[in-house]
Amino acid sequence: MSQAGLAAAITTVDEIAPEPRQALRNLILALADSKRILGIRYADWVLGAPELEASIAASSIAQDEWGHSRILYALLKDFGDEPDQIEHEREPSAYYSIEALDESLATWPDFVVANAITDTALTIQLEALSESRYAPLRQRVKKQLDEERFHFGHGRAWLRKMGQASDAARASLQAALAARWPAIVSWFGPDDHGALLSEAGFSDATGGEARARLVDRVAPIIEASGLEVPTPNLDFSGWDPSSRRSRRGGPDSDAIARARGDRNRTFLMD
């Protein structure tokens, strides 16, 4: 960050005007929820991945995402939220997670698309916050970005490996990509979404700019794998700018139960 930027750094949410403060809080929650659910989806493949090394990687990446989500949830205390309540007591409809993760990653191609593309979409948004004027967020984002480089490398390697394996493998990968691509690119919102945060110095990308950055990053690895980049018909008529969602249901009930830790909470003591 430049010296001018450092001079303008903000260390408490009390220094942020109400409208951008609420927008920043919603963005942090959207990232935290998305990473929490993504960690659960990765964990489903700790057993059953095609190779032992892939199972180990799934475990490591799942732990990373879970850790990222906890760090982001903790930040919400400064915005007036209760992190424990947010982590453990919400219903599915209250989750702000990316819709591309609402259903389980039922096949390995689904996992690969989540690893190479969905995960990267979250990283693109994190990167837009890496020079944020809000110092507590900026400080926590940088370590997460270091770990995300491994996630992208793993996803890219598997995308190419499957894309070059056989016609059947490539077709299954293309189908998985086509099914989730619209929800991934829509997550950033309309082109002008986030302009308030950009103008205030809390982010350096609007929805359209972040979407373009994602396409620029993943299109080469998609095409190098023998796949086509889908062209979605973006429709934001029912899109909610707070949750970044069009569907109101949220992730499936099993994922929510695991995200909240329902089965383990019975063992906690007051």
Image (spheres, rainbow, N blue to C red):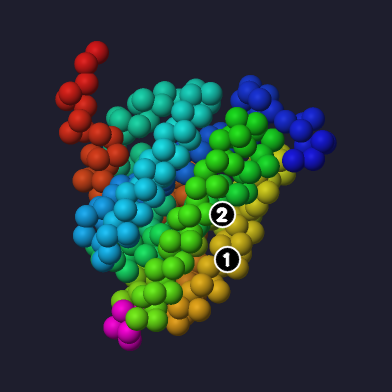
Viewer-proximal residue among 197 and 51: 51
**Residue at (21, 46) in percent of width and height:** 254
Question: Which residue is the site of mark 2?
Answer: 124
Magenta-drawn segment: 166-170
Asked which secondary structure carries label 2, the reply is helix
**Residue at (41, 52) in percent of width and height:** 98
Query: In the displayed structure, would residue 46 be above or below residue 80?
Result: below
Queried whether the magenta region covers residue 168, the answer comes back as yes
Query: In the displayed structure, would residue 217 be above or below residue 169?
Result: above
Q: Is residue 19 left or right of residue 73?
A: right
Queried whether the magenta region covers residue 255, the answer comes back as no
Query: In the displayed structure, would residue 188 be above or below residue 17?
Result: below
The disc labelled 1 sits on which kind of residue? Arg
Give residue 81's quadrant in the image. Answer: top left
In the image, which disc is placed on residue 243? Answer: none
Residue 63, horizontal then vertical, whole percent: 36, 43
Viewer-proximal residue among 150 and 190: 150
**Precedes in sequence: disc 2 or disc 1:** 2
Residue 107, horizontal then vertical, whole percent: 26, 66
The disc labelled 2 sits on which kind of residue? Ile
Which residue is situated farthest in the right direction here? 4
**Residue at (48, 35) in percent of width and height:** 72
Give the main secondary structure, helix, strand or loop, of the magenta stretch: helix
Viewer-proximal residue among 228 and 99: 228
Residue 264, horizontal then vertical, whole percent: 20, 30
Question: Which residue is the site of mark 1?
Answer: 217
Asked which secondary structure carries label 1, the reply is helix
**Residue at (39, 65) in percent of width and height:** 113
